[in-house]
Image: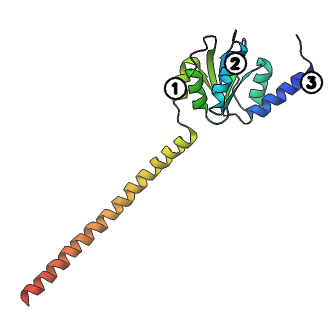
Amino acid sequence: MAISKAKKDAIYSNYLEVLRRTQGMVITEYRGMSMKNLSAVRKALRAVDGSYAVVKNTLFKIALRETGFAAPDDLFSGPVAVALAHSDVAKVTKTMLGIKDQPLLVLKGAVMGQTVFKAEQLEALSNMPTLEEARATLIGTLQSPATGFLALIGTPAQNLAQVLKAYSDKLQGGTTDAA
């Protein structure tokens, strides 16, 4: 059944709006899944700030390109639904990998910006640190050399102070012995 140009425009506009606030997505095949199964997947994704939607492949690929995402043809063939990550792609991927009670749900891959992940790479994607964790690690790495450098600079001054104190103590000890 063909859809009207106005309906296509509305769907496309909706895709653009959703993709502009999306960090990445897991592409799935949902062939044969019941509405109950789709609802269970949606519920699981809402808990990790994600959503799940059946998409029209051609319109969705155009919207992906428009918003700066990769649109691999091999992932967008057949009946496709996408798990959209609105904040953390790793959590959404981990959630999708953890859905074991949906045998009809097939994970095809993922897209994050211009990077495309195949199905066998999803486990690695699910273990990626969050943006905040990555920033904290980077800051820690940058601060570590600075802390070491400051300690290194301070060490000669400490040693000099200890030598001067020892010399001063010796001088004071020597004058009290003579008096």
Q: Which residue is mark 3?
A: 6
- Which mark is on residue 38? 2
Mark 3 or mark 2: name the one nearer the start of the chain.
Answer: 3
Amino acid type indicated by mark 1: Ala
Q: Which residue is mark 1?
A: 124
Relative image position of residue 8 (x, y in whole percent):
87, 22
| Display coloring | rainbow
Q: Quadrant of the C terminus?
A: bottom left
Q: Distance between the Cα atoms at labels 1 and 3? A: 41 Å
Amino acid type indicated by mark 3: Ala
**Left or right: 31 as drawn, with respect to 12:** left
Residue 75 visible: no
- Which mark is on residue 106? none
State the residue at coordinates (68%, 14%): 30
Residue 116 visible: yes
Q: Is residue 32 above or below residue 54?
A: above
Q: Is disc 1 in contact with disc 3, using a CB cutoff of under 8 Å?
A: no
